[in-house]
Image (spheres, rainbow, N blue to C red):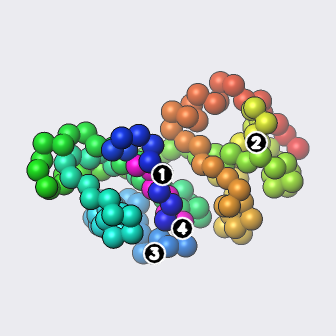
Amino acid sequence: MKLEFTDDDCYKVFINSAYIKDFDIDSNDDVGKYVKMIILKLRKLYGITLEGFYEVHVYYIKYIGMILDIKNIDTYYGKTIDLKIVVHNDEKYYLKIDQYDLIKKYKEANYFNNYFYLSTSLLQKKDILPLIENIEIVYGSSLNDLKNKWYHLTF
C-alpha cells in the first residue's frame, strides 16, 4: 500500500493487485468492505484517524491494483466517520513512463513533455511487473487535460 497526501484531509492510496484477493468491483458490498478495511489500515500503519464525512473515489485497474482518492467533505460528525463511495468503472487509465525501452514493444503510445503514456488496455498480466516500479498512473481530470496536448505514436 502506498499513501500520498494530496492536500489537507485528502489522501491517495494505491493498493497493488497482488494484495487484492476475492474482490468484485461490481459488488457494492465488496467495495464497501474493502474501503473500510483500507481506512482501518491507515490508522494502524500510519496513525491516520479519519473523522467526519468523506467522499471516496474508487478506481480499479485490472492487473495493476486499486486507487482510492479520499477527500474530507465535512468535519462536523464528531469522532465518527461516514463515507460516500463512488466507483469509477468506465474510467480509462494510462501509465506515465519516462523510458522508451519499456514501451517500445507495444504498437502504440502517446507522448508529451518527455513522457510516454501507455493505455492499460494494451497490457497483459505478464507485462505489468517490469513496469510497475517505473510508472505513475494517469486518470480522471489529469488524463483529460493531457489528451489535448499529447502526440499519438505508432511503432
Residue located at (48% from left, 51% from top) = 4
Badge number at residue 87: none
Q: Secondary structure at mark 4?
A: helix
Residue at which label 3 appears = 21
Relative placement, left or right, of 40 versus 135 is left
Q: Secondary structure at mark 1?
A: strand
Q: Secondary structure at mark 3?
A: loop
The amino acid beneath tag 2 is Phe
Badge number at residue 17: 4
**Disc 1 and disc 3: Cα gap in Å?**
23 Å
**Disc 1 and disc 4: Cα gap in Å?**
18 Å
Could you say where residue 57 lies in the image, as x and y percent from the top left?
A: 38, 47
Where is residue 151, by image quadrant?
Answer: top right
Image vertical order of residue 68 relative to residue 112, above or below:
below
The amino acid beneath tag 4 is Ser
Could you say where residue 39 lies in the image, as x and y percent from the top left?
A: 32, 62
Q: Earlier in the sequence, mark 2 or mark 1?
A: 1
Please provide the residue range marked out in magenta.
11-17
